[in-house]
Amino acid sequence: MSREAFRIGGVDVPAGTRRALELPIARLPHGAMAALPCVVVHGARPGPAVFITGAVHGDELTGVEVARRVLAQVRARDLHGTLVAVPMVNVFGVTEGSRFLPDRRDLNRSFPGSERGSLAGRLAHMVMTEIVAPCQVGIDVHSGSDHRHNLPQVRGDLDDPRTRELADIFGAPISIHARERSGSLRGEAAARGKKVLLYEAGGPHLFDPHAVDVGVAGVLRVLGALDMINASPIDHRTHPRISRRTLWTRALRGGLFRVETRLGARVRKGQALGTISDVMGHRLARVKAREGGVVVGLRMNPVVFQGDALVHVAVLEEPASSAGKRGAKVGGAVSTPAAPAPFRPQASDPEEARPPRDDGSHEGDA
């Protein structure tokens, strides 16, 4: 018996085929129709449905390239299940080079949206009904915004066993426990029983090669563990370190910030992270780590105002019994010789997320 077609936007995608579509969003002031580009790879064989989304914020382009490269390695005739890729969710923001939509709303605070709401609400509603609803698992790709760059990291509800398993399989250098924020794509999808990872890496307005490489490898690992593709054993996967608390060190005064650390560096409480000087180079303030941990975010624009977020540090959770078995440097952990058992989507459990400290950062949905 042949597999049923996958229906999206009123279009049926037959099993064993790939289809690129443009889902109409809204008419622009000059009359042209703005559309949401997506690609559906509907496998010839049954399996789970997974979505990949990129550029929910228009200045965060890492997901655009991650989705393109993943699609290049997935063939419908070999796929078990369905892959729905939306490389450029916020088409309006990407066009304008802006994080936001033309109505000045943050799309990642507008879910689940409304069919008759604002422009952001209408786009959010379309993503929820056409992309999220038919899937069981999702990977939402983000990057740093507003002159900030991020170490490759996964965020999710690590208290949920299946989400934690997916995060471990993805294999980013660090996994950060983060509550599901109401209004975000991840939060609203999780509220509907979906298991969603948020991958953060790189900076705004660019394709960072390392960020893209880690993202592509992670997505393919997840698809392999879901038995959707024939993936080689995960024998060079980094074992993620875990963090349940992150905090920003902020500028005590305005000036020119000269950074003295790097992404992925281990820092001690009180360690110098940089200096703030005046235009003539006279030091005005020393920037020091508020806690020990790993640098997961950096401001790259040296011009700072008082209160600007400068260095983002993740406080690491110490392994219970394997402290001597893992590499001390993030990204340099020992490899795991065998692939984990395939992940099987299950019915959702009640979500009990522990809120992390909110230091005013607005990357991703954290």
Image (cartoon, grey):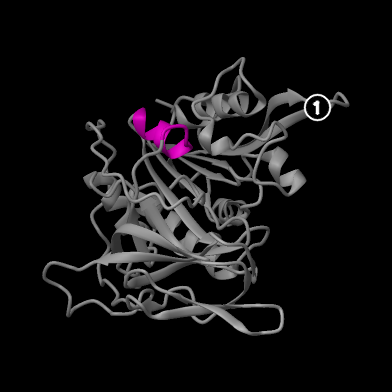
Visible residue check, residue 17: no
On screen, residue 268 versus residue 319, left or right, reads right
Q: Quadrant of the N terminus?
A: top left
Q: Looking at the magenta stretch, what is its main secondary structure? A: helix
Can the viewer see residue 208 in this picture? yes
Residue 315 locus on image (x, y percent): 31, 65
Seen in the picture, residue 281 relative to 183 is either above or below; the reply is below
Residue 183: in magenta span? yes
Residue occupying the point 41% across, 78% down: 265
Please name the amino acid that badge 1 sits on: Leu
Would residue 43 be counted in the magenta stretch? no
On screen, residue 230 versus residue 250, left or right, reads left
Classify 145 as above or below 265.
Answer: above
Residue lying at the far top of the rendered structure? 116
Q: Residue at x 49, y 26 (%)?
A: 112
Say if 216 sits above or below 185 in the image: below
Give the secondary structure at mark 1: loop
Residue 186 location (% of width, % of height): 43, 39
x, y percent for residue 168: 30, 58
Point 80% across, 27% down: residue: 28
89 left or right of 133 in image: right
Q: Which residue is mark 1?
A: 28
Q: How many marks?
A: 1
Residues in magenta, as a range: 182-192
